[in-house]
Amino acid sequence: MLKRILILISICCSFVFAFSDLERALQLYEENKFSKAYDMFKKLCEKDSAKSCFSMAYMLENAQGISRDLNTAYKLYNKACNLGLPEACFNMGLILQNQGYANESILAFNKACNLGDVKSCNNIALFYEKDKDGKMATYFYKKSCQLKDAAACYKLGFLYEKGELVRQNVKYSLSFYFKACNLGYAEACYLLGRYNQLETKDLQKAKIYFGMACDKKHKEACAAYKELNSKTIEIY
């Protein structure tokens, strides 16, 4: 029993020291002491510290205190990605994309997206949107929307409203505009205001949405709110 406790204490202490070493390496990096920081990151990366591998890769990619080496940077990003760091998968995707490997970049972005990286989900969605593949574009925009990305929710509302890449569906469109609005996307609130003003003739609800958009500095919404306000329409 005592032996087991000592082993647990040893493991806990090793985590503490490793965390302290990473903090120290990051501090050296912030102080522009790149050579020392890189050496520390290297030792930690060898112990499977994902953030340390990522930091090494970033320094190699951007020639910070060390000669630029994109191949080694890619390998280190790949290691950090496999260790579960979404930012590393995303940077892998960017390297592949910039070198013209579109399909390979999608695979890297997909790894990051599955790890909850919104930028990567949106990158894939945009790729398929440009490729006129509405099914795949909406699939990845929905993943971003589920991760509470307001712009992705808005884009879904727009796509279902226009009905060009996917079948037009007003119900879906309003639902995604509603999500985007609640996440603070002013244009979505404004469009919901217009829908309620012009389609359902619910001026009370329209005023609520115009007010929400106006609070986000949406000029047209502020003007619409002012117009309804002059008609003494009560919100509640």
Image (cartoon, rainbow, N blue to C red):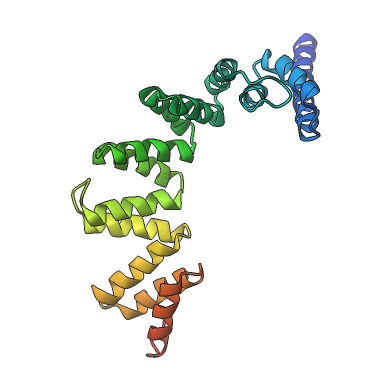
Query: Which residue, as the protein is rendered here, is positioned at the far left?
Result: 167
The x and y percentages for residue 211 are: 45, 74
The x and y percentages for residue 80 are: 58, 21
> Can residue 236 be seen in the rendering of this structure?
no
Residue 1 image-quadrant placement: top right
User: What residue is at 59 percent from the left and 20 percent from the top?
Assistant: 73
Residue 134 image-quadrant placement: top left
Q: Is residue 2 left or right of residue 119?
A: right
Q: Nearer the viewer, residue 104 or 98?
A: 98
Q: Is residue 81 left or right of residue 120?
A: right
Q: Is residue 159 above or below residue 127?
A: below
Q: Nearer the viewer, residue 17 or 79?
A: 79
The x and y percentages for residue 79 are: 56, 17
Query: Which residue, as the protein is rendered here, is positioned at the far top?
Result: 3
User: What residue is at 54 percent from the left and 25 percent from the top?
Assistant: 84
Count of marks placed on residues: 0
Query: Which residue, as the protein is rendered here, is positioned at the far bottom?
Result: 231
> Can residue 80 be seen in the rendering of this structure?
yes
The x and y percentages for residue 103 are: 36, 24
Q: Nearer the viewer, residue 61 or 108?
A: 61
Q: Is residue 228 above or below residue 9?
A: below
User: What residue is at 53 percent from the left and 23 percent from the top?
Assistant: 81
* Quadrant for the C terminus in the image: bottom left
Residue 76 image-quadrant placement: top right
Q: Is residue 107 above or below residue 129?
A: above
Q: Is residue 6 above or below residue 59?
A: above
User: What residue is at 37 percent from the left and 60 percent from the top?
Assistant: 178
Q: Is residue 116 left or right of residue 190?
A: right
